[in-house]
Image (spheres, helix red, strand yellow):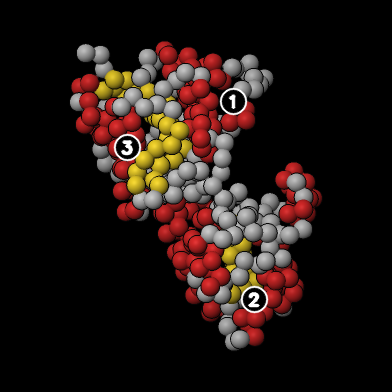
Amino acid sequence: MAKHKIGILTSGGDCPGLNATIRGVAKATYEAFGEDKVEIIGIHDGYHGLIHGDYKAMEPSDFSGILTTGGTILGTKRTPYKMMQIIEDDKVDKVKEMKDTYKNLKLDCLFTLGGNGTHKTANMLSEEGLHVIGLPKTIDNDIFGTDVTFGFHTAVDIGTEVIDRIHTTANSHSRIMVIEIMGNKAGWLTLYSGLAGGADIILIPEIPFDIAKVAKACQRRADAGKAFSIIAVAEGAFDIEEAKLKKKERAKARAERGEVTATARIAKEVQARTGLETRTVIPGHILRGGSPSAYDRILATQFGAHAARLLKQEKFGYTVAMVDGNITENKLVDVAMKTKFVEENDMMVLTAKDIGISFGN
């Protein structure tokens, strides 16, 4: 009997839980078909490796001891979906090369671990006739159709710890601390970290803020005898004036002011309006690093096992998901071009407002 030959790649930004998911896929696949009946090909650096034929045959031992390891043993790169069908100066037809690599390797299936961009390309390859199964990874938790993505809960834990630690120094120095949390399009990570960390103000892309109201919220706390305020800001947050601009116009205006995100401007304006000393904190890629939490190790294992189940059922063109606490799957075509945003009536937003957290609006 011929071996089942599968490829695995990790694409986009790294996050805790990638290795745990790779391990879950591998172990469940070996268990389903037998170790001697499976050959797993690890593709280096995401779709870049699929395009350029950079891969290695994996051994069962490669998947041992990686449950708790951060990052990805396969390496990862960002290969934007919008560039996939564009032939650039290097004259490489990316779609053709990916299909050729898949066919030359005689793969029965390709597992793709990644976020929104990864899922767009996975769907494109599926529509090109390749057998693809996706697994939803991102600290942003913004993949449509799944309640949660692996990597998110660990990032929330880290973001919460950052805010916890800033509380003590903010209190000691009677400062307003503006903490920038990753999340360019969706505010899930900032919302959860801010709520868990006891932030006083949470600013996310889905709810444009009024800087006057942000400053007023800080002043109100100061007037009530509170020595400090914590403002959790998603990197993609913008104010009500910027909300009137298109994305490119907003980026141009910020570039002209020498800004990348709104964080530094928020701090400057709050200090100018209140007279209270204000500082910024940017944990950045710390949120992506390190060992996955117990929750993410379990979720990654569940997702990996379900992906192997889909392979055994020959159910291709799907991505794994959690819906209402159950591990299931969605068609790639149904989720690939969509983003899951925070809505103003989301339970977490309403909970935050119920306990007096301001969203600056």
Question: Residue at position x 31%, y 43% from top?
Answer: 302
Direction from residue 149 to residue 336 in the image, left or right: right
The N terminus appears in which quarter of the rendering?
top left
Q: Which dot marks residue 317?
A: none
Amino acid carrying label 2: it is Cys
Direction from residue 192 to residue 1 in the image, left or right: left
Using the numbered discs, state the Cα–Cα distance from disc 3 to disc 1 in whole angstroms: 28 Å
SS under mark 3:
helix
Q: Residue 317 sits in which quadrant?
A: top left
Task: Give the foreground label among 2 and 3.
Answer: 3
The percent coordinates of residue 250 (x first, y second) are 75, 49
Question: Residue at position x 48%, y 24% from top?
Answer: 126
Number of residues whose C-alpha sits closer than 10 Å to that of mark 1, classed few (under 14), some (14–19) or many (20 or more)? some
The percent coordinates of residue 9 (x first, y second) are 42, 30
Q: Nearer the viewer, residue 77 or 123?
A: 123
Number of residues whose C-alpha sits closer than 10 Å to that of mark 2, classed few (under 14), some (14–19) or many (20 or more)? many
Residue at the spot of label 3: 306
SS under mark 2:
helix
Amino acid carrying label 3: it is His
SS under mark 1:
loop
Amino acid carrying label 1: it is Met
Residue at the spot of label 1: 84
Task: Give the foreground label among 3 and 1.
Answer: 3
